[in-house]
Image (cartoon, rainbow, N blue to C red):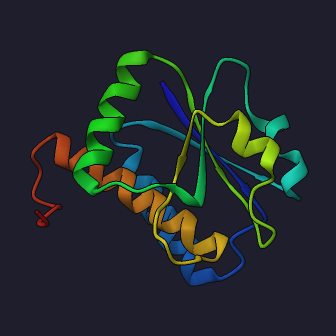
Amino acid sequence: MRYRVVAVGRVKDAALRTACDEYLDRLRHYAKVEEREVKDEARILGAVPAGSRLVALSRRGAQCSSRDLAAWTSRWEMDCRDLVFAIGGADTLPDEVLGRAELAWSLSPLTLPHELARLVLYEQLYRAYTIRRGEPYHRGS
């Protein structure tokens, strides 16, 4: 199984890019992860490989705890399907992407800039894997 993150736009802020790269490096100890940046929301579905599970990051999606995410990642791995996370830009994700997604997931009820949403996604995926392995990174309940 491989995670793919399809995001609109680049992470322009150097500090956020460094933080994203740090969590990507950590996450890659546990899973295969790729990033794909597209120019606009209309190109998101074109970057989703056939047969992949699509998870749309949307403020209107389902919320979960870090432990819930750990359980989701376990189930996703058992399905042996690649998984694509779609992150929209300032115009959010189009209805076509939300309709095609098997899951709409909300990182927070707050509106997050796409660059920050990407960082939160990487950190939470890393956290999920450390939870699953009983590693000391996660100290929450």
In the figure, residue 77 lies in which quadrant? Answer: top left
Left-right relation of 131 to 112: left
Q: Which is nearer the eye, 16 or 101?
A: 101
Residue 95: x and y in percent read 79, 48
Residue 10, placed above or below residue 125? below
Residue positioned 37% across, 58% down in the render: 124
Residue 89, placed above or below residue 41? below
Q: Quadrant of the C terminus?
A: bottom left
Q: Which is nearer the eye, 16 or 5?
A: 5
Residue 26 visible in the snapshot: no
Q: Which is nearer the eye, 10 or 66?
A: 66
Give the mark count: 0
Residue positioned 90% across, 49% down in the render: 42
In the figure, residue 100 lies in which quadrant? Answer: top right
Residue 107 visible in the snapshot: yes
Left-right relation of 33 to 27: right
Residue positioned 52% across, 20% down in the render: 81
Residue 3, placed above or below residue 69? above
Residue 63, placed above or below residue 97? below
Residue 79: x and y in percent read 42, 17
Q: Which is nearer the eye, 47 or 41?
A: 41
Residue 138: x and y in percent read 16, 61
Residue 8: x and y in percent read 77, 60
